[in-house]
Amino acid sequence: MKKSIFLFAILFMALYTYNAEAQALKVPKVEVPTADLQKQLLSALDNVEGLGLSADQTSKLKANNKTFAGEIFKILGGTGTDDAKKGLLSKLGGERQKFLTGLLGNSLLGKYTSKINGLVRPFKSKLGLASMLF
């Protein structure tokens, strides 16, 4: 009798251990955004048609857009934790907001932001953590 209880206990432990391994989480591999996605984002950010910007405003905005997009993908491709990346992206977004407000003013900023959000929407999910900026 003791032998059968002992064997039953070992069998139960083996099955319990097997189930515990079967429940292990499988973490999906995170893809680093590609250069093509960076080009798509830059193209969306550079689209200023219909906003009535001066040539000087357009050139300053496009120069900042190139730097902004580069910084986004530099942060996303970095080795930091998600929380660290979110912090860096939040800081970058704040700096960007100050620049745009100074360059465009509040009324043009609203129009530009609406336009950009519409253009970024199709690939926003591919941006991962950076999607919080748009």
Image (tube, rainbow, N blue to C red):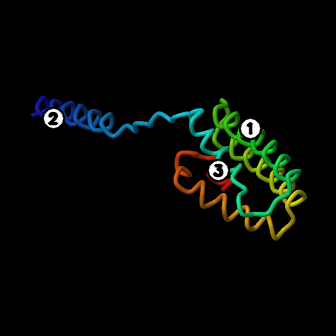
Question: Relative to the observer, which residue lies in front, 86 or 102?
Answer: 102
User: Which residue is located at x 18 percent, y 32 percent?
Assistant: 11
Q: Please state which amino acid type lies under the numbered disc 3.
A: Ala
**Residue 98: x and y, percent?**
86, 56
Give the CA distance from mark 1 to mark 2.
Answer: 60 Å
As drawn, the label of residue 48 is none
Badge 3 local density, few (<14 within 10 Å), some, or many (20+)? some
What residue did someone put label 1 on? 71
Kindly state the secondary structure of the residue where label 2 is placed.
helix
**Is 54 drawn above or below residue 71 in the view shown?**
below
Q: Which tag, 1 or 3, sits closer to the chain's start? A: 3
What residue did someone put label 2 on? 8
Badge 2 local density, few (<14 within 10 Å), some, or many (20+)? few
Give yes or no for contact between labels 3 and 2 (Cβ–Cβ under 8 Å). no
User: Which residue is located at x 21 percent, y 30 percent?
Assistant: 10
User: Which residue is located at x 32 percent, y 37 percent?
Assistant: 20
Kindly state the secondary structure of the residue where label 3 is placed.
helix
What is the residue that sits farthest to the bottom in this orientation? 107
Nearer to us: label 1 or label 3: 3
Q: Which tag, 3 or 2, sits closer to the chain's start? A: 2
- Image quarter hosting the C terminus: bottom right
Give the CA distance from mark 3 to mark 2.
Answer: 65 Å
